[in-house]
Amino acid sequence: MAKNKSKKKLPLVYQPVGFVLSWAGGALAGMAFRQAWKAIRHEDDAPDALDPDRGWGEILLAAAVQGAIFAVVRSAVDRTGAKAIARSTGQWPATDKGGRD
């Protein structure tokens, strides 16, 4: 019975760890996006959606690249954190098998 309680508590305990990992992953993804944009367009700043001097194609390209980078980094960080918790506790931190969203 005690083992069952620890299984239910682990996701709650993992939440602060997940928050820190998500924050760090967001910072990492932001840096990766800036570097990718420099490589793609040879510009320091990506276009903002409200910039009147940028066209639709450039704005949507920047959004697509940024979204892809953030999704990959978020998944890599989440998976790495979950595997570390599983290695240290012997339990997977998520109770359900559903997706994030």
Image (spheres, rainbow, N blue to C red):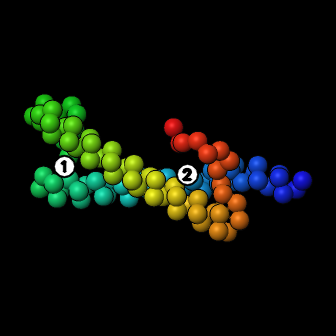
Residue 73 screen position, x and y as percent:
40, 55
Query: 81 or 99, which lies in front?
Result: 99
- Using the image, tell me which numbered label, if any, was put on residue 57: none
Tell me what residue is drawn at x 76 percent, y 49 percent.
Answer: 8
In this orientation, does residue 59 appear?
Answer: yes
Q: Can you tell which quarter of the image residue 63 is in? A: top left
Is any part of residue 21 visible from this angle? no
Q: Quadrant of residue 91?
A: bottom right
Residue 26 in the image: state x and y as whole percent: 41, 52
Amino acid bearing label 1:
Asp
* For marks 2 and 1 on the same chain, the one whose residue lies earlier in the sequence: 2
Residue appearing at x 22%, y 34% in the figure: 49
Foreground residue among 63 and 4: 4
Please tell me whether mark 2 sits on a helix, a strand or a loop: helix
The residue identified by callout 1 is 45
Residue at label 2?
A: 19
Q: Residue furthest bottom?
A: 88
Distance between the alpha carbons at the discs numbered 2 and 1 = 28 Å
Query: Residue 44 vs residue 1: left or right?
Result: left
- Picture quarter containing residue 88? bottom right
Determine the residue positioned at 21% across, 37% down: 60
Amino acid type of the residue that numbered disc 2 sits on in the rendered structure: Phe
Position of residue 100 relative to residue 87, above or below, is above
Looking at the image, which residue is at 20% across and 46% down?
Answer: 46
Above or below, 98 relative to 9: above
The location of residue 66, given as percent across then percent down, is 29, 47
Q: Is residue 56 left or right of residue 2?
A: left
Q: Secondary structure at mark 1?
A: loop
Residue 31 left/right relative to 58: right
Q: Position of residue 85 (x, y in %)?
A: 64, 63
Pointer 2 and pointer 1: residues touching (CB < 8 Å)? no
